[in-house]
Image: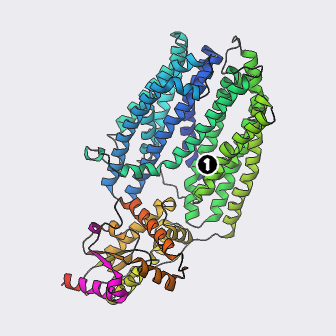
Amino acid sequence: MKELDLGKEKINKLILAFSIPCVISMLINSVYNIVDQIFIGKGVGTLGNGATNVIFPLVIVFNAFASLIGNGAAANLSLKLGEKNQKEAAKGVGQAIIFTIIISFLLGIASFIALPKLVMIFGCTENVYKYALDYGRIICLGAPFMIIYSALSNIIRADGSPKYSMIMLVVGAIINIILDPIFIFSFDLGVKGGAIATVIGQVVSFGIAIIYLKKFKSVKINKESLKIDKNIFKILGLGLSSFITQCTVLVLFVFMNNMMTRLGSASKFGSDIPLSVYGVISKINSIYISIVLGISIGAQPIIGFNYGAGKNKRVRETLKKVIAINFIVGILFNLVLFFFPRQIAGIFISSTDANYDLFMEFAILLCHSFLLLISLNALEITGSISIQSLGKVKKATALSFIRQIVLLIPISLFLSIVLDKGIYGLAYSGCISDFICFIIAIFIVGGEYIKLGKNDYQSDDKIPLKENNYHGKHIVVTISREYASGGRYVGKLLAEMLGVNFYDKELISLAAKESGLRKEYIEKIDESKRKSANDDRIFIAEAKVIKDLAKKESCVIVGRCADYILKDNKNVLKVFLYSSDDAKVKRAVKYYGLDKNKALKQIIKINKEREKHYEFYTSRAWKDMSNYDLMINVDSQGVEKTAEFIKNYLSNNND
């Protein structure tokens, strides 16, 4: 299949190509619990439905840790492959596998032991308690299989095998669907049967994932790569965003479970029916969320690439079409839920169930209130993911938190308790928070959309790579330096003395050309150098540019982890420059215009940011003398003589 050009191909074709696999994968993840809910509801009834709902927070916890490790390892694999560092890439995958195995068994054992207390925290009622334990204990036993295959599915996708990952999930889901009625009805095992069917499906998916370990395309897993060291924390850091998102979902789900049981007990519905129905409604809503998320996540690379390339017109077109598609999906779901709530809810309960009428009444209430405006969520979900693709992480995170934490919880407490509307207040809190969130999202997403229209720029700066050497010899000097130590000036003087090119800010234009990212975007990240602002695409592009420069010409390169990037190259002199706090303050005040009273604090802050950036990408200490050939205190000789000292050092060691 011909590789699609993200910067030139028609947007409609790109959305279809990237979003459909994502939608399928997202829907598969929803299947396990929905299938159990349907068959258990038919076979056991309201209490069985309540049990699956009570155990669902545990499933969220398992998925959160799988995402933490799996997404982190996938991102790390892509980064190291971009650097052409096969050894570190294999090491990252190996560490992630071992760490996943350890965590999965610890979580499985801990949750099994603590299950009686956990189900009560998750909103379990007295009547549901036995069913929740029966179902939950088996789910806990299957936790290691679920966590391992879920984490590996992300890594397998990053290895270039998305179809294999999808097949792995589909096979497990199909087995679950086939076995559910057999164990629940034929073997009369009730909730235990549903749990057993789920775990068997997970074991099969786990087996398929394990088989892939011998088929990795990009790396080879060996014993050496399976040793865990401190780099595992870097890998986990790359998956932290997904983990936090899952934790947010967990908090909301546990809150709503407890509110349903507490407020339901004071109504005609009792505590069991609201708990059970909320679980059913949540699973129905998860189908809608899966489709919208899948379409939005699929559009991420399209938006990110074109934004980085300065093609804002294509970004606006993609954003507009994805929002429109997701709104259409949302409206269709709203219409179905509004006009056919009885038919949908009826899938999850037998008409002979003693609680059938009250179950239906409450399900209709939630469809006509809590889920009344779910179509509006399309803007919040799409906007959050799209804004993240534009590098606006804080705005994206804030937008995703607004409905679930900032709005829904306070509004539900206000309506149900302060205004004393009870279970009905809780029911209507959903549509009210959806509407308010939609208004807020209009301003946030609309603001970003307007900004995109102001500039459609693509960097075309070109800096030719010249063939030049120092006295006929090929030499590259990398300079790492403390902020305000005079390191950049030393590097520039040295380049003039040697008669070679000097690269600092010049690398931004070259990296923009290499990556397709916009020059202004790279400048913004370059200025911050904060860990939260790291962009792997920039580092990979700069690393390639630096390697190309080092191969083609003699030069002086300042910063950008060049000493690490060229660590295996010959004829490279690696220098670290530093100076005293007093000297740095004087230089910062004189040359950078910093306030004398605040200069030292600012210098310390910037140096910490540089240190974090360096350690993030190299896993080495920034000031470790073993990384460098020379570590020079600029104060001892001044910038001019420091440059001359390095030149003389080169002359004496290259004769």
Q: Which residue is mark 1?
A: 296
Count residues near mark 1 (Cα–Cα under 10 Å), then give few for <14, some for 14-19, many for 20+: many
Q: Is residue 494 visible?
A: yes
Which residue: 65% across, 21% down? 348
Compared to residue 462, the image places residue 543 above or below, namely: above
Q: Examine the structure image and report whether residue 326 is included in the region drawn in magenta.
A: no
Residue 563 in picture, x, y percent from top left:
33, 70
Residue 635 rendering spot, x and y as whole percentages: 35, 83
Left or right: 60 as drawn, with respect to 97: right
In which quadrant is the C terminus drawn?
bottom left
- The quarter holding residue 349 reads top right
Residue 328 on image: x %, y %:
72, 43
To which quarter of the image does residue 564 belong? Answer: bottom left
What residue is shown at x 52% (from left), y 55% (from top)?
A: 4
Position above or below: 648 against 215: below
Helix, strand or loop for the magenta stretch, by majority: helix
Q: Which residue of the protein is positioned furthest toward the left in this rendering?
A: 655
Query: What's the amino acid at mark 1?
Result: Ser
| Nearest the eye: 110 or 274 | 110
Of 137 and 524, the residue lying toward us: 137
Viewer-side residue, 11 vs 541: 541
Q: Return the x and y of residue 41 as percentages of the image width and height.
A: 63, 18
For residue 639, side relative to residue 30 (left or right): left
Q: Reply above or below: 246 against 363.
A: below
* Vertical arrangement, residue 508 with respect to residue 284, above or below: below
**222 with respect to 75 (left or right):** left
Residue 647 falls inside the magenta stretch: yes
Q: What span is colored magenta in the figure?
A: 625-650
Question: Can the viewer see residue 33 in this picture?
Answer: no
